Image: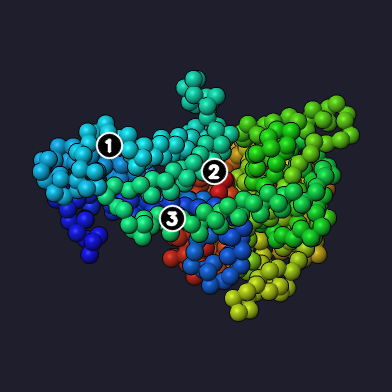
Amino acid sequence: MRTVATFKKAFEVMGYCLCAAKGAAETLKFNMALILLPVCRNTITWLRKNRSINSVIPFNDNVNFHKLIAGGIVIGVILHGGTHLACDFPRIVGCNHSVFRRTIGSGFQNHQPSYFEILLTTESATGIAMVVLMAIAFSLATQLPRRRPSAMPWPLQRLTGFNAFWYSHHLFILVYALLIVHSMFLFLTKDVTEKTTWMYIAIPVLLYASERVARALRSGLYNVNIVKATAYPGKVLSLKVSKPPGFQYRSGMYIFLQCPQISTFEWHPFSLTSAPEDDHLGVHIRTLGDWSYQIYSLFQETQISGNSGFPKVSIDGPYGAASQDHVKYDIVVLIGLGIGATPFISIVRDIAHGQPKTLGYINDEESVITKGPSKAYLYWVTREQGSFEWFQDVMKEISEANRRQPVVEMHNFLTSVYQDGDARSALLTAIQALKCTKNGIDIISRTPVRTHFARPNWFKIFSNLASKHAGEKIGVFYCGPSMLVKELEKICAKLTTTTSTRFVFHKENY
């Protein structure tokens, strides 16, 4: 009753502005708690093992969900802070003095403050500080400054990029500390039981903090050494590191990699291209940013100098990814653009060699049974011929395995050459066919896997698959630039509704 009476008195001064600000504050509490859960990677990897939970919660879209919540926080901040600054505070300052003393005066020691005095209070100062810190973090996390710093105005180029995004995100440690202080000094709220912010964020903050501690401890326990480092065309670095004792993973998973010589704080995710039964861990790193360029240069300098010792690296993981869901399907279609083929390399190796898959569920818990996709199609699209060297040994390995049991079909597409049948590529096509007929080796990829020219006709490819596997359910997995996502989703949806074959689309974050 006391709370209702206090609210009625405050409403008499601030009106519906108070309702808008309070409502936005409640959404902010919830979203500030929720935004931490999608980045608790160990928890997500563990939860995705439970079939009932995995079927309801979209763990594969955890990054997009994180961004969606961030958007909700931005809206909440604008509504909460904007309503206070533009409506509530002016009404408090301009309120009739007698009305002020009768309603909310006791909350201000019966002193009617000026606008500037309100801004200097603990509540306002912490709120403004949080907005400034969040604005910095949100701005540096957007697509342009994070991935294309060179496109920014020259004074900002040194202040943007992945490093700026990574370090600025840690400003949220201060934001959460300020949020607790902010919630403890609320205007007109003296009863501690009404200050509920800590109730919202306590468990998520503790969960996230424990995850960070667990990651640091685990990465320290994994003592790994570089077994082999290879530089490929296109500035791609292949690393094979020793497999720590007890390190278990499934095809499609990824790990985080750190190189102390570059930074002791930066950890970057890379899909495992080695198979679970291998005695090493393999990753392929393409130079797409500051850190990847530095590690490529570091290993290249080591190789050129003839130094027998490689730079030290640390690993953390493994973590679950969308492509792990391939075990749910009898038939899978894997589509990788450029370096986007990496999540699928360990998968096709597993399928080609008929390895046992973690697939079945007993009482909603995973159990190992020998079953998995009976057929896999890998479509790898790239612009550069040299890219085929990245996984040349894998293509040869799978081609050899297919002689015993043809379960994996691999199709390479080189988009820098005119399509098959075009007069401008007729000579190359003829030489390719002659060479392949003579010794079974494709002259482009230098493997038994045939290379097609130009971009794939996806509708034709999927229509053929629908005809070939009528009435079946096919899992489609894509990793690459987002420009192709909508086209593939549209084709899958159309053929699912117009044919007896059902296509289920999944995508990796690129």
- In the image, farthest residue toward the front: 109
- In the image, farthest residue toward the bottom: 363
Residue 6, above or below 261:
below
What is the C-alpha distance between the residues marked 1 and 2? 48 Å
Mark 3 and mark 2 lie on one chain; the one further toward the N terminus is 3
What is the C-alpha distance between the residues marked 3 and 2? 40 Å
Q: Dot 2, crowdedness within 10 Å: few (<14), some or many (≥20)? A: some
Type of the residue with mark 1: Ile
Question: For the point 89% across and 34% down, which residue is it?
Answer: 308
Name the side, left or right, on which 195 lies relative to 468.
left
Q: Dot 3, crowdedness within 10 Å: few (<14), some or many (≥20)? A: some
Q: Nearer the viewer, mark 3 or mark 1?
A: 1
Type of the residue with mark 2: Pro
Q: Identify the element where label 2 is drawn.
A: loop
Type of the residue with mark 3: Trp
Q: Identify the element where label 3 is drawn.
A: helix
Q: Dot 1, crowdedness within 10 Å: few (<14), some or many (≥20)? A: some
Q: Which residue is mark 2?
A: 481
Residue 502, above or below 109:
below
Q: Which residue is mark 1?
A: 118
Question: For the point 73% across and 29% down, which residue is it?
Answer: 297
Q: Which residue is mark 3?
A: 198
Q: Nearer the viewer, mark 3 or mark 2?
A: 3
Q: Identify the element where label 1 is drawn.
A: helix
Q: Is residue 472 visible?
A: no
State yes or no: discs 1 and 2 in contact (Cβ < 8 Å).
no
